[in-house]
Amino acid sequence: QKEVEQNSGPLSVPEGAIASLNCTYSDRGSQSFFWYRQYSGKSPELIMFIYSNGDKEDGRFTAQLNKASQYVSLLIRDSQPSDSATYLCAVNDNTDKLIFGTGTRLQVFP
Amino acid sequence: GAGVSQSPRYKVAKRGQDVALRCDPISGHVSLFWYQQALGQGPEFLTYFQNEAQLDKSGLPSDRFFAERPEGSVSTLKIQRTQQEDSAVYLCASSTGIGGGYGYTFGSGTRLTVV
C-alpha cells in the first residue's frame, strides 16, 4: 500500500511568517510530487510541482524535495490570511494515478 | 470550456437509488480521472481514462460503481443502489498529458449525500 503522510494540523502562523508544510511518502519509486491547495468547500487547486531533488521556487512558494529521505515540503513566505486552507501533498510513481495525503490545515492569523 | 465542469453540484439520493454524475473535461485533455473525497480526507483514486479507454479502474470500491467515457470527452460516473458510505464529494480531473505525472485540473466536484 503506497502511502503519503501529512500532519493534519491545524498549523497556525502569524501573518508575515513562514509556513512550513511537510509530507513523507512510502514508495521509493515515486517520480513526481505535487502540492494542491484546497479552500473549504472548494476543489483542490495545483500550486506547485517538483520532480528533482532540491528546491523549486515560485513567488512566495518554495517546494523542497529529498528523495533519499522520502520527504517533500512546501514553504510559504510572507504568509497571508488568504493562504488559510488545507494543503494536500500528492505523489505519482509514473503510473496513472496520484496518491494524496489527508492534507494539512493552515491557519494564518492577522 | 475553460475548466473542468461537473454536474450536478449537489445530489441527495435515497439509499438504494441509482445516481449518475457527469464530467466535462477541458477540451483536448486526453486523460480523465475520477476521485472520491470523504470529509476530512484527501482525494482517493477511483478510475482513469485515456481518451475513451478505461485503463485503470482499480480504485472503484465495488461493482456498484461504473464509469464510462464513450467518445473520449464527457464522462459519467454511475453508482447503483447507493449506500450511506457512498456519501462523499466526487471529483473529476483532466490532464493534457498521459497519466498522472503532470498534475491535474480538478472540477468543482459533486457532493453526494445518501439518506
Image (cartoon, coloured by chain):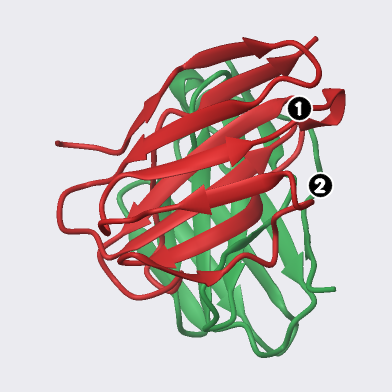
Chain colours: A green, B red
Q: Nearer the viewer, residue B63 or B100?
A: B63
Q: Position of residue B3 (x, y in %)?
A: 24, 37
Quadrant of the rendering where the N terminus of chain A is positioned: bottom right
- The chain ID associated with circle 1 is B
Q: Amino acid at mark 1?
A: Thr
Residue A63 located left or right of residue A98: left
Q: Position of residue A62 (x, y in %)?
A: 45, 58
Disc 2 and disc 1 on one polypeptide chain = no
Disc 1 marks which residue? B82
Could you say whether the residue bearing mark 2 is in a helix, strand or loop? loop
- The chain ID associated with circle 2 is A
Q: Amino acid at mark 2?
A: Asn
**Observer able to see residue A110:** no
Q: Position of residue A54 (x, y in %)?
A: 50, 80
Q: Nearer the viewer, residue B16 or B24?
A: B16
The residue located at (41%, 62%) in the rendering is B103
Q: Which mark is residue A7?
A: 2
Could you say whether the residue bearing mark 1 is in a helix, strand or loop? loop
**Observer able to see residue B74:** yes
The residue located at (25%, 56%) in the rendering is B71
Q: Quadrant of residue A70?
A: bottom right
